[in-house]
Amino acid sequence: MSQYVVGLTGGIGSGKSTVADMFVELGAGLVDTDAIARELTLAGGAAMPALTAEFGRDILAADGAMDRAAMRQMAFADPSVRTRLEGILHPLIRQESADRCHAAAEPYVILAVPLLVESGSYRERCDRILVVDCPENQQIERVMARNGLSAEEVRAIMTAQATRQQRLAVADDVVLNDADRTKIYGQVKALHSNYLTLLAVKLKAGC
């Protein structure tokens, strides 16, 4: 069981996955709530019976998984859809992520939660909050290139998330992802060393 949990968050397109992968390379565990959500919404996933009961079979892709694009369009058209979707998925994600953090064998765990600031309930699980930060124009450019969305669609997603200022206000640590990979890795390596030190202090104190 890992004794130390670092909550990792950041806006869409900030580079959370890149930073998380660097921590894993250095020996940290990773529990990714986005990955859990995808598992739950695959064909046969644990959330699918409740989702189809709530929204109908129109949300299904050809392979039986949840059609994420169709769901996103529904949520933008009707804000209540997002609330209903989260009501089904979030309890399942919270439980599964807690189980995986508890079972992790690594010295500490990176708990990647895109909506950590917005949800509130994850913060109490974390010893530290790490925010991956970058200028908003870079977020928009990255998501447009990665997902094929328009600038307006990306801004709509960003509007539904916490602001950059709100994330930074709760951060214990920040990785600035506006430069090359070498500089980002240097920041991550320093934080990794610090987290191992803080873990040792916590264990010594018997917390």
Image: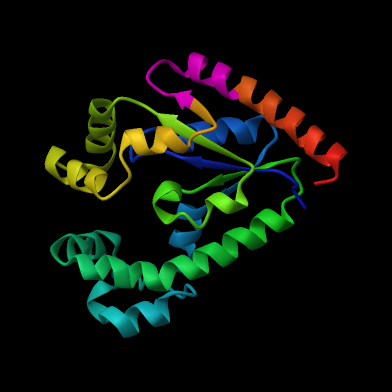
Q: Is residue 183 magenta?
A: yes
User: Does residue 73 appear left or right of residue 8 in this picture?
Assistant: left
How has the structure been colored for display? rainbow
Quadrant of residue 71 within the rendered picture: bottom left
Q: List x then y, in percent, for residue 191.
A: 62, 25
Is 188 placed above or below 3 here?
A: above
User: Does residue 33 appear left or right of residue 199 in this picture?
Assistant: left
Is 121 placed above or below 139 here?
A: below
Q: Is residue 88 magenta?
A: no
The residue sitting at the bottom extreme is 53
Question: Which region of the structure is painted magenta?
Answer: 175-188
Is 48 placed above or below 8 here?
A: below
Name the residue nearer the viewer: 39 or 100.
Answer: 100
Q: List x then y, in percent, for residue 116.
A: 45, 49
- Name which residue lies at 51% across and 64% down: 93
- Name which residue lies at 28% across and 32% down: 139
Looking at the rendered structure, the number of numbered marks drawn on it comes to: 0
Residue 114 appears in view: no
Q: List x then y, in percent, for residue 6.
A: 61, 41
Q: List x then y, in percent, for residue 10.
A: 41, 38
Residue 79 appears in view: yes
- Name which residue lies at 40% across and 38% down: 167
Quadrant of residue 55 within the rendered picture: bottom left
- Name which residue lies at 48% across and 63% down: 39
Name the residue nearer the viewer: 76 or 38.
Answer: 76
Name the residue nearer the viewer: 141 or 172.
Answer: 172
